[in-house]
């Protein structure tokens, strides 16, 4: 299945997109596209408390979804394919308050990172989707302005800023 | 790591000529080892400026620099080896800058780093700075930035180092300055 089909799925689900449910919609889209389910994180509440210490000060409303065993094909995840999918995603979101901000690709690591924002304010809702060859993470979090600037400076390490995705696939 | 950069800073009011990124440049992400594209639209910039702190020196610097901008777009590509992008890829961009509306006001060629940086300004009918394009290239990289809005040279210099925009030595232009991080 190509990223185009994923984009079509997202376009079809546009009525739900942007209604404050962007995180859930992305999770569903990834599950549908890759035929996987988000990983169950035991004791997520406890994990949240533990990882909270690793997050930048002032962040809140943290949501995380992790997908394993994606088995992404290299040709399926060419930057142009992924960008097309995410641009469509962003276009749907932008109409309802989400703005695509960053696309970052690292070919050696096979990592693609996309950052979207809600309306900028003292605290800004940020959605970070990171795709590795065998794993993906989706993060939604409210961040203060200084953290937003940090994300712009190092978008390729956006997930790591929140204590997620520090390890790389070794498969 | 060598980085070749193409920066397009175009702050163009409505109706002004827009700079378009050539399609062949947009395809470079597939060849690049690392690529980053950042897009900040006018709404985002205005809101960001509104909520950036005046008390934090870094935020205050960014706030001042972006306060008059309509958009910022940065395309940055780094390649594993020399020659993985064709300098001719940039020609389509340079062709747009050959129009009378644009003037190349700064060109730097570094033999040591093999870095070329060109800065183009667009002046509107009122004599105000209405657009800037910066093209900086090294053998293993390419970055493209587009900005729309108004700012002065000092603000342009302050944008260096932000949003993956390279730091620029504009001291030779008389008004700007280089901030070394």
Image (cartoon, coloured by chain):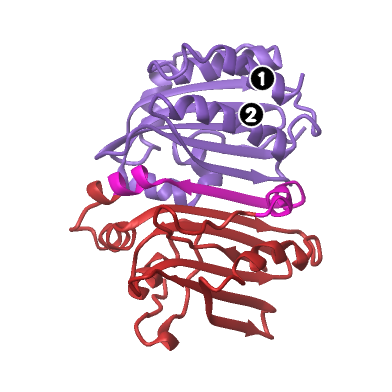
Chain colours: A purple, B red
Q: Residue at x 67, y 33 (%)?
A: A82
Is residue A156 or residue B121 the one in the foreground?
Answer: B121
The residue under label 2 is A85
Callout 2–callout 1 Cβ contact below 8 Å: yes
Is residue B148 or residue B53 the one in the foreground?
Answer: B148
Confirm whether the magenta stretch covers residue A31: no
The residue sitting at the left extreme is B55
- On the image, which quarter does residue B108 sit in? bottom right
Please tell me the numbered disc located at residue A6.
1
SS category of the residue bearing label 1: helix
Please tell me the numbered disc located at residue B176.
none
Q: Which residue is drawn at 47% across and 75% down?
A: B168
Residue B1 visible, this angle:
no
- Percent position of residue B144, x then y: 59, 59
Q: Which residue is drawn at 38% across and 44% down?
A: A148
Residue A137 vs A148, above or below: the answer is above
Distance, label 2 to label 1, CA atoms, is 7 Å
Which contiguous range is marked in magenta? B22-48
Few, some or many residues within 10 Å of mark 1 (<14, 14–19, 20+): many
């Amino acid at each position: 299945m190509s990223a185009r089909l994923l984009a079509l799925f997202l376009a079809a689900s546009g009525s739900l997109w942007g209604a404050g449910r962007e995180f859930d919609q992305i999770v569903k889209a990834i599950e549908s596209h890759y035929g996987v389910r988000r990983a169950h994180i035991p004791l997520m509440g406890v994990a949240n408390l533990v990882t909270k210490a690793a997050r930048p000060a002032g962040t809140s409303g943290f949501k995380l979804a992790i997908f394993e065993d994606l088995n992404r094909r290299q040709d399926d995840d060419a930057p142009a394919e992924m960008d097309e999918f995410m641009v469509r995603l962003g276009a749907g979101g932008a109409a309802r308050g989400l703005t695509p901000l960053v696309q970052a690709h690292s070919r050696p690591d096979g990592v693609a990172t996309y950052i979207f924002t809600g309306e900028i304010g003292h605290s800004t809702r940020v959605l970070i989707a990171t795709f590795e060859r065998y794993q993906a993470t989706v993060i939604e979090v409210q961040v203060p302005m200084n953290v937003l600037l940090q994300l712009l400076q190092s978008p390729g390490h956006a997930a790591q800023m929140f204590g997620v995705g520090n390890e790389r696939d070794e498969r | 790591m060598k980085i070749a950069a193409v920066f397009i800073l175009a702050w163009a009011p409505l109706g002004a000529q827009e700079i378009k990124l050539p399609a062949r440049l947009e395809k470079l992400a597939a060849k690049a080892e690392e690529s980053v594209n950042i897009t900040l639209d006018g709404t985002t910039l205005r809101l960001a400026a509104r909520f950036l702190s005046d008390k934090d020196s870094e935020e205050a610097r960014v706030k001042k620099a972006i306060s008059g901008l309509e958009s910022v777009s940065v395309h940055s590509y780094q390649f594993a080896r020399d020659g993985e992008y064709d300098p001719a890829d940039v020609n389509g961009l340079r062709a747009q800058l050959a129009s009378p509306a644009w003037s190349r006001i700064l060109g730097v060629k570094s033999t040591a780093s093999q870095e070329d940086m060109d800065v183009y300004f667009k002046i509107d009918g009122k004599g105000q700075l209405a657009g800037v394009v910066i093209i900086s290239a090294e053998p293993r990289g390419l970055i493209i930035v587009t900005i729309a809005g108004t700012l002065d040279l000092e603000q342009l210099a302050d944008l260096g180092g932000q949003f993956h925009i390279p730091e620029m030595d504009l001291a030779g232009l008389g008004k700007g300055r280089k901030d070394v991080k």
